[in-house]
Image: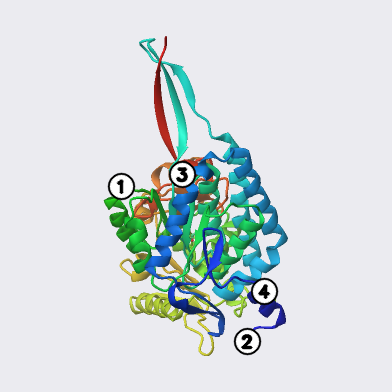
Amino acid sequence: MTNETEKTLLDAVPTQLFIGGEWTDAAEGRTFDVRDPATGAVIHTIADASPADGIKALDAAVAAQESWAATPPRTRSDILRRAFDLVQEHKEDLALLMTLEMGKPLAEARGEVGYGGEFLRWFSEEAVRITGRYGLNPEGTGRMVVSQRPVGPSFFITPWNFPLAMATRKIAPALAAGCTVVIKPPELTPLTTLYFVKLLVEAGLPAGVVNVFTTTSSSAVSGPIIADPRLRKLSFTGSTEVGRKLIAQAAEGVLRVSMELGGNAPFVVFDDADIDKAVDGAMLAKFRNIGQACTAANRFIVHEKVADDFASRVAERVASMKVGRGTEDGVQIGPLIDDKAVAKAVDLVDDAVSRGATVLAGGKAIEGEGTFFEPTVITEVAAGSDILREEIFGPVLAIATFSDEDEAVRLANDTEYGLVSYVFTQDLARGHRMIDRLETGMMGLNVGVVSNAAAPFGGVKQSGVGREGGLEGIHEYLSTKYTLIPAD
Ligand SMILES: O=CCCC(=O)O
């Protein structure tokens, strides 16, 4: 059941597609329900786009591309900056909306508004710093001009776990660079994007520059857009399995792609680590977003001399975590996104236990309303356990041990993923060695969260292609153009 505040907020969320600057029904007026994972109750009913609706969204983005690319960078920057201010003004609404549709605790949802909003501010600052080069060629016969052009109409498929930040992390650099956008928010958490787009319009975004469709038929609607020769760029955040298929589809049109895919982050604790800091870092790296982050620590690889101490300290913290609907005071662990996520956590824990792991805290799904799983610590996890190989995406902290640095590196790198790693050591030289030796696109050295709008977010190996955020982020939406002009 929703209360009056929640009802008023939900009533303010658009229920239609946003195409060419107009809110419009889906073909044949089709709709679908959005549910609160904490209760299973329907909280909103919104438009369910067809493939034809998707193509209309692309038509609008294509029609707006030339004028948006020609819009002065300062104007693009000002719109993004106003959008940042509006996000701050509507912080409480956006946070509550994310908690309602995704389940994360309200305090964390507020944190996401801060994080997601920063991409708007950062790229409002980057929009006016797109530069080029000018110089004489070596022969002295020509002047070489190197400039940056917007890539063109871009299609975004965003995930359910960070409903605001994953949208702003893609939309803001695209707009800053002069690209128009079609975005498909996730079926499970579409409301935040719809609400955010209302704010973009209020910030002065011209018609057709951002177009949104919501749908229950993701591949059927996305496929024709990706196959359309007018599209220039595809950006996706989600699983490696889906990303691989999208890359294959994008290859047909030789599209630029940015892929932020799965992770299997190692969290390595050396015997010289400050254990208090390692425990604090572990709580963040594991339980942020109820463990449902691609950056979540997946494998705790702890030196055998400190493993018992580390395990008992995290287990004590975990046992006292409050579980409940994210809107309740003091809740640290909300529901998982759906039944499948709960079943996966159950299977991974059962498999590890059947191979000899010990449960120190939690360990089970919570019976009753909603999709809750107890925050869990398991230790003595044996090599070969599924939990060391698969992305958990839930509040389960699994500990295995090592005896020397080479073994720690071997275990940490023993995965096809390479998004982020976490290392705890007080030995500076060892920390530097780990930066070189761990095969990940990002690393936290004595810290449990690395995400920041000013930092290049992305992975190596099967964790993806490209970087979002930082100085690098805008270049995903720019292509380099070289022009030669005779010198005389
Ligand atoms: O789950 C992916 C995004 C996580 C983050 O931006 O910190």
Could you tell me which secondary element the residue under label 3 belongs to? helix
The amino acid on which the numbered mark 1 sits, given as a three-letter code, is Val
Placement of the C terminus among the 4 image quadrants:
top left
Q: Nearer the viewer, residue 468 or 205?
A: 205
Instruction: Check the image and report above or below for 381 versus 156.
Output: below
- Dot 4 or dot 3: first in sequence order is 4
- Dot 3 or dot 2: first in sequence order is 2
Mark 4–mark 2 distance (CA, rounded to whole Å): 14 Å
Q: In the rendering, which numbered label is found on residue 9? A: 4
Count every numbered label the image shows and give the total.
4
Placement of the N terminus among the 4 image quadrants:
bottom right
On the rendered structure, is 324 left or right of 223?
A: right
Going 48% across and 62% down the picture, which residue do you hit? 296
Dot 1, how many residues are within 10 Å of its Cα: few (below 14), some (14-19), or many (20+)?
few
The amino acid on which the numbered mark 4 sits, given as a three-letter code, is Leu
Q: Nearer the viewer, residue 12 or 323?
A: 12
Mark 2–mark 1 distance (CA, rounded to whole Å): 48 Å
Residue 69: give x, y in percent of width and height: 51, 41
Q: Is mark 1 within 8 Å of ligand 1?
A: no
Q: Are marks 4 and 1 in contact (CB under 8 Å)?
A: no
Circle 1 residue: 254
Q: In the rendering, which numbered label is found on residue 1? A: 2
The amino acid on which the numbered mark 2 sits, given as a three-letter code, is Met
Instruction: Check the image and report above or below for 360 versus 255.
Output: below
Circle 3 residue: 477
